[in-house]
Amino acid sequence: IETFHLGAHPAAVAYSMTTLGAGMMNSIFSFYYVKLFLNKYKISEGAFHQSQVVYMVWNAVNDPLFGYLQDNSHVPCCSQRRLSILYGAPFYAIAFLLAWFPWREYAPGDWMSGVHLMVALCAFDGMLTFVLLAQCALFAEISGHHQSRLRLIKYNQVASLIGSSSVLFCGLLSQNMDDFPSFQGFTVLVAVLACGCMIYTGLHSKSRFDTKGSAPGSNYQGSGQSTLSFSLVTSMTLQILTNRDFQLFVLMNFFQVFMVAFCNNFTMIFAEHLIPPNVLPSLAKSFMYGAGFICPQLVVLSSQSLLHGLGYYKIILLTFYVEAGMAAVMLVLGPHHYYILAFFLTANMVLVQAAFSLFNLPLADIIDSDLQRHKRSSPLSSMVFGTNALFTKPAQSLAPMLVVSILNQFGYENLKDAGRDANPSDLEALHTTMFYLVCVVPMCVAALQVFAWKPFSIRNSHTVDTMYIDG
């Protein structure tokens, strides 16, 4: 019988507290660190790019590395999800603070600032991965009930909504980092609060598999080995990689990660160039950008009954059809329907992020399916999440590199600051290219996602009370 049914909400609250803490830190880190190192620490362009390349490699590698460690370690702080969060939380908070305190007075182009950025990025991403990978695995392991997982999604979205507001308060209190001592003080406060939130998860969350004494990972226990052999790890990894549903999900998710990066990085650039300020003033655009970040959580929270009735498979597929349809209509209408274009940019951003918020559900079902198929004593939750990240995270870098490359072919590098004072024909060519990117990229990517997602076979978990009986 299912041990930890979420009829009582404390399990969902405990789970979502890590999302709240991580959301507070991640929002501030991603929003401010580039400005800090470029403008205040005056890092050289070469050192900045070198740090980013090291970070990109580490960002991809650490997910499967920590996934293997958490699924196959015999050390409780690694093998038990809640203990990974409990003991990882203080280090996560310390890693968050590394960036905000200079190691010395940096001269412009100081090599030390480059080392500082590299260490700060890798330490922060390493601890983020260690803690959040354990939380992702906990999502699959708290309960096998579809309705319970939907409750986790709901609480998670509320926590994410609250956590992302840390950027707003940070900006108000530090005058957008102009008052640097106040900024540093606020980051310390955020680190302490976030650490407390995650420790709450570590103390109060439970996995159905915490009490199972055998080594995690598979049905190979009893071999007498104290650690899993390389051949056994390879075998388990191949079992994950040859899972047809996992392959289809990773392909679809790669394109979704690409679209999330595309929307987050370029919606503001496209809106500023394609929608004249006399049509949509700066304040209105600010609300538009804000809606792009706030509304996805509200959409997911308000779609609980749809998730109960239709299941995530149909809803995710529907979002792809809607994205492709909206992009096709926008392409036909043309670039001069400014209000419709503003709505399209915002709605596309919301749909992409809202659908992305549901992806823990199919991954959890893939983990359940793998557990049954290979008769494992406990699930390979972290390995599945980590292997997924290994293949999808490169899309975070691919999207900006590809789009900037295309834009620069049409003079974006020279025209971005010139604005409407630039040569009209050059500007028209750039704006036409931007409009086609706005429409064609979502349309083509959504079409590819439909082809990748349609054969996915786990479609009815929302109709099944529990997918297996816990021992």
Image (cartoon, helix red, strand yellow):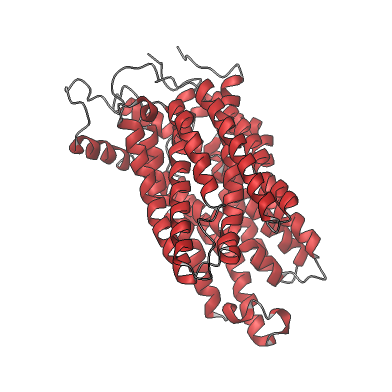
Name the image quarter holding residue 57. bottom left
Q: In which quarter of the image is the C terminus?
A: top left
The number of callouts visible is: 0
Residue at 36% across, 25% down: 76
Q: Position of residue 21 (x, y in %)?
A: 59, 37
Name the image quarter holding residue 419. bottom right
Residue at 53% across, 64% down: 106
Q: Where is residue 376 in the image (x, y as percent from the top left)?
A: 30, 25
Residue 88 visible to the viewer: yes
Name the image quarter holding residue 318. top right
Q: Position of residue 273 (x, y in %)?
A: 69, 72
> Considering only vertical position in the picture, is 20 above or below 413?
above
Residue at 53% across, 17% down: 5
230 or 341, which lies in front? 230
Which residue appears farthest toward the top when viewing the image?
1
Residue 324 visible to the viewer: no
124 or 333, which lies in front? 124
Q: In which quarter of the image is the N terminus?
A: top left
